[in-house]
Structure formats: C-alpha cells, structure tokens
Amino acid sequence: HPTTWYPTTPGYGSPNLYGSIMGARHSIAATAPWQDDDLISDYTNFGGPTHDKHAAHDVMMARKGMAAEEPTVTITSLFENAVKTKGDKIALRTERPCPPLVDGVAGPVIPLHDWKSWTIAEYYAECRNAAKAFVGLGMGP
C-alpha cells in the first residue's frame, strides 16, 4: 500500500519516532482501505507551518476526484447565508461574568438569561471587525 499520502514536513503528520501517522498507529493505517494516490491532496510543495504574516500556501488539491475540484462554497459564503436565513438565532453564549471561585472550586452556574450571547448576525459582524483589524495590521492574502 502507498505510504506517501501524509504531509512530509517533520512533526506535521509524517511518521514520527513513535510510529504514528496523523495520530493513527501504523498498524491501523496499514489496514485502511486504499483507492488511488491521485484522490489524495498533494502535499509535495507544502513547506510546513509558518508564523510569517507574508507567507502563503497554495491550497493542496488532489489530481482527480472531489478533492481536485475548486470549491464552489466557501466558509464565508456559508456564514453570510446563515446571517440571511438565521441571523437572529443565537450562535454563541458564554458565562460572563464567570462566577467567582469558592475555595478554589467553580461556583454555581449563573442563569442562562444572564449569559453574554451573540446572534449569528452579531457574530458575523464581530468576525468582520476582527478581519479588518488583521488587515490593518498588515495581514492579508
């Protein structure tokens, strides 16, 4: 069976000294059904992770099959559609302010109506504001 389907950057899915591939033991990976190398995303030119804000990686596409097709839907378009269709629904909640610790133990949960909540539309607006801030700091495509 092929063994080239995983990224080759050390520490990023390549077999490590404990013998795992992307978290799976070799024995499990060795028994997994295999179809065709061309159906798996090609990591040949993957240079590994970086913290350089000017670095960019190409999307790793397969040579054929579903993973070779350009995406027709993006996360952004899914998010925008959710805003249009369900924008008033709660997307996130957090217990804010958090109850104080009592003798090092979390206190009782505050009532749900006192939690900080964001609707899908509010969450989308917060994400756009964060993205604009990142662009303002020089991050971008």
Image (cartoon, helix red, strand yellow):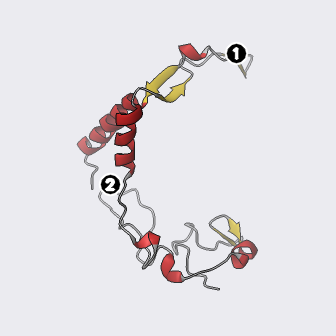
Figure quadrant of residue 101? top right
Q: Which label is found at residue 74? A: none
Q: Is residue 83 left or right of residue 22?
A: left
Mark 1 in CB contact with mark 2 (< 8 angstroms): no
Q: Secondary structure at mark 1?
A: loop
Q: Which residue type carries mark 1?
A: Pro
How far apart, in angstroms, are the residues tagged by discs 1 and 2?
Answer: 42 Å
Q: Is residue 100 visible?
A: yes
Percent across and percent down for residue 78 are 39, 46
Percent across and percent down for residue 40 are 51, 75
Q: Secondary structure at mark 2?
A: loop
Is the N terminus in the top left, top right, bottom left or bottom right quadrant? Answer: bottom right
Residue at the bottom extreme of this rendering: 1
Q: Residues within 10 Å of mark 1 (few under 14, many from 20)?
A: few
Q: Which of the two labelled residues, at mark 1 and mark 2, occupies the earlier sequence position? A: 2
User: Which of the pair 50/91 is nearer the observer?
Assistant: 91
Q: Residue at x 38, y 66 (%)?
A: 59
Q: Which residue is mark 1?
A: 108
Q: Which residue is mark 2?
A: 53
Q: Residue at x 59, y 19 (%)?
A: 98
Q: Residue at x 71, y 75 (%)?
A: 26
Q: Determine whether 129 is above or below 76 in the image.
A: above
Q: Residue at x 38, y 35 (%)?
A: 85
